[in-house]
Amino acid sequence: MITMAEELAQKQLAAYNAQNLEAFLECYSDDVLVIEFPSNNVMYQGIEGMRERYGKMFQENPDNHAELLSRIIKGNIAIDHEHVTGRANGKESFAVAMYEVIENKINKVWFVV
């Protein structure tokens, strides 16, 4: 059985790779909180901050792509390990993101830094 956390993690990843900003944002709550882990520094909050950040990133990096390497699901949490390529600067990276789902939307995101 697919959980809501798994469904939303996959949906936002597919939208990210398609650079479909509206479909990507649909997965997140209006007051989404994006945090660095383990410092707990808030990177930004709210859907409009996310719209600005990802809209600019999609525009500047048209070949951007995140390949899912692994996913762990625990209740309402999804943890993704991704290989990110296609950035305009040519740099590849590996990312770990944790998504918390509340009321059928991603409410919090932690990026391991």
Image (spheres, helix red, strand yellow):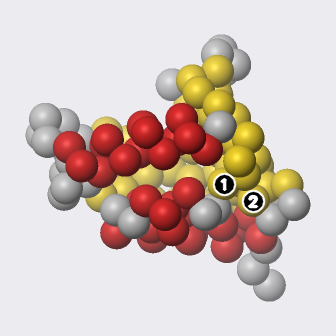
Number of marks: 2
For residue 12, what is the image quadrant?
Answer: bottom right
Q: Nearer the viewer, residue 51 or 103?
A: 51
User: From the viewer's perspective, is residue 21 above or below residue 4?
Assistant: above
The disc at residue 55 is none
User: From the viewer's perspective, is residue 48 above or below residue 20?
Assistant: above
Name the amino acid type tagged 1: Tyr
The disc at residue 105 is 2
Say which residue label 1 marks.
Answer: 28
Which quadrant of the rendered structure holds the N terminus? bottom right
* SS label for mark 1: strand
Q: CA distance from mark 2 to mark 1?
A: 5 Å
Q: Nearer the viewer, residue 59 or 108?
A: 59
Where's residue 110, x and y in %? 64, 35
The residue sitting at 48% across, 45% down in the picture is 51
For residue 46, what is the image quadrant?
Answer: top right
User: Do we see residue 108 in this rendering?
Assistant: no
Name the amino acid type tagged 2: Lys
Where's residue 15, x and y in %? 45, 67
Q: Nearer the viewer, residue 79 or 29?
A: 29
Is there a contact, CB below 8 Å, between mark 2 and mark 1?
yes
Q: Is residue 11 left or right of residue 102?
A: left
The residue sitting at 50% across, 50% down in the picture is 81
Where's residue 26, x and y in %? 61, 63
Q: Earlier in the sequence, mark 2 or mark 1?
A: 1
